[in-house]
Amino acid sequence: MTTIIDEVSAYADELLNTHAIPDYPSALNGLQFQASVPLRGIAAAVDFSTRAIESAKTLDANLLIVHHGMFWGGLSPLTGAAHRRARLLFDYEMAVYSSHIPLDCHAKLGNNVLLAKELDLTPTREFARYQGIFIGVAGDSDIPTQLLVEKTSSFARKYGHTTRTTPIAGGRRTRRWGMCSGAGAAADTLQEAIDTRLDTLIVGEGPHWTAITAEENDLVIIYAGHYATETLGVCALAQHLSERYGAPWDFVSAPTGL
């Protein structure tokens, strides 16, 4: 039975509860570029880009799933690079489906629950409140913080990132941790970590000042890379759709170094 990409998109919206989850205005979660054609293959990428489109074409995929979508940088005229990307999508009859916070916070396919699993951590509560929902996860453990850093570094290296941390005292152990992928060390999230007495916060990236605030509050931050921490969700979604609709999928690796 032939599956039209519009059907896949509608199912993904329902699965991720897309229209009920708040997000930044430029996220525009859901189907961002329509191609009402039969699904041939799925490509997953963190970011929408010319590289991602061309790589998807090489894979003979005509559904590109991304975390940061076509309009992430805000409104802009369809000229220059934006026009070239749109022309490629038309020429290749390729659809673009984007999912940002819905894919960060999903209980099974989300970046944060999957990153916790990668690091052998078990989430037991929600974390990182945003407009009435929680994006991240938190939990309890009793492991050497340096061991957690090593596990995080091993994961991040697969995606071209070098993990950084705030100062870690010898013998320190992680007993109360929180996690928020991407730009997780925002002011609100950092204050939440302090208020809930976390000793370790795992994020993708954060402003320079967050390292100072963390050290002053006896909090270790592990900066695992914005790109690296947001590879898991798009892959999980692509694999799930692949299994449901019988179409091949692959990950388009295009590390940014951030």
Image (cartoon, helix red, strand yellow):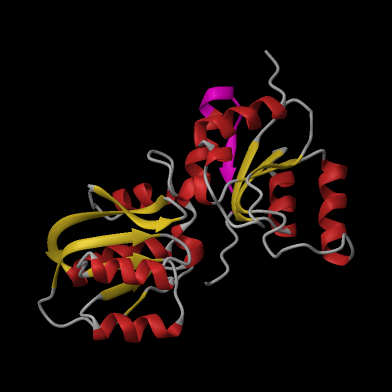
Q: Is residue 139 left or right of residue 84?
A: left
Q: Is residue 161 left or right of residue 173?
A: right
Q: Quadrant of residue 217?
A: bottom left
- Between residues 4 and 106, which one lies in front from this camera angle? 106
- Rendered residue at 31%/74% (across/down): 221
Residue 236: x percent and y percent? 47, 41
Q: Is residue 185 visible?
A: no
Q: Is residue 237 left or right of residue 216?
A: right
Q: Quadrant of residue 31?
A: top right
Q: Is residue 6 visible?
A: yes
212 to 50, vertically: above or below: below
Q: Quadrant of the N terminus?
A: top right
Looking at the image, how many numbered discs can be counted on the residues?
A: 0
Residue 32: x percent and y percent? 72, 44
- Rendered residue at 26%/75% (across/down): 220
Query: Is 166 contained in the magenta span?
Result: no
Q: Which residues are magenta?
A: 243-252
- Rendered residue at 22%/48% (across/down): 122
